[in-house]
């Protein structure tokens, strides 16, 4: 669970452009990009769902 929270924090920092060099290097040292891909897909899906719900509430 702690690993996933760390990855989530790292992905959020990278998305906002505030990722530190140390964390960036640690992320690229990971053997598999799969966790980052999963976080990206889930984050994108949550963004789309949120935008759809906001749009439906307004219209």
Image: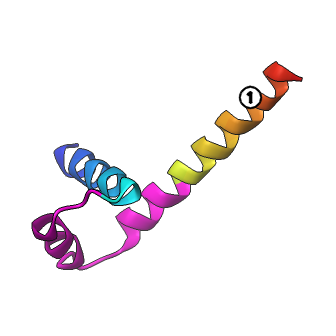
Which residue in the rendered view is the most extreme toward the top?
57
Which residue in the rendered view is the most extreme toward the left?
22
19 sits to left or right of 43: left
In depth, the one of 44 and 32 nearer the eye is: 44
Which residue in the rendered view is the most extreme toward the right?
59
In depth, the one of 14 and 9 nearer the eye is: 14
Highlighted range, magenta: 18-41
Who's the residue at 82% across and 21% down the image?
Answer: 58
Who's the residue at 20% across and 52% down the image?
Answer: 3
21 sits to left or right of 52: left
23 sits to left or right of 8: left
Classified by dominant secondary structure, the portion drawn in magenta counts as helix
In depth, the one of 59 and 6 nearer the eye is: 59
Which residue in the rendered view is the most extreme toward the front?
17
Q: Residues within 10 Å of mark 1 (few under 14, many from 20)?
A: few
Q: Which residue is mark 1?
A: 53
Who's the residue at 24% across and 60% down the image?
Answer: 19
Q: Quadrant of residue 35?
A: bottom left
The answer to whether 57 is drawn above or below residue 22 in the figure is above
- Residue 33 falls inside the magenta stretch: yes
Q: Quadrant of residue 56?
A: top right
Could you tell me which secondary element the residue under label 1 belongs to? helix
On the image, the x and y values in percent for residue 10 come to 26, 56
The answer to whether 38 is drawn above or below residue 47 in the figure is below
On the image, the x and y values in percent for residue 12 come to 35, 50
- Specify the quadrant that holds the N terminus: top left
């Amino acid at each position: 669970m702690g690993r996933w929270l760390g990855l989530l924090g790292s992905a959020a920092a990278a998305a906002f452009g505030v990722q530190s060099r140390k964390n960036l290097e640690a992320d690229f040292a990971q053997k598999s990009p799969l966790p980052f891909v999963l976080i990206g897909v889930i984050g994108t899906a949550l963004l789309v769902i949120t935008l759809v719900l906001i749009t439906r509430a307004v219209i």
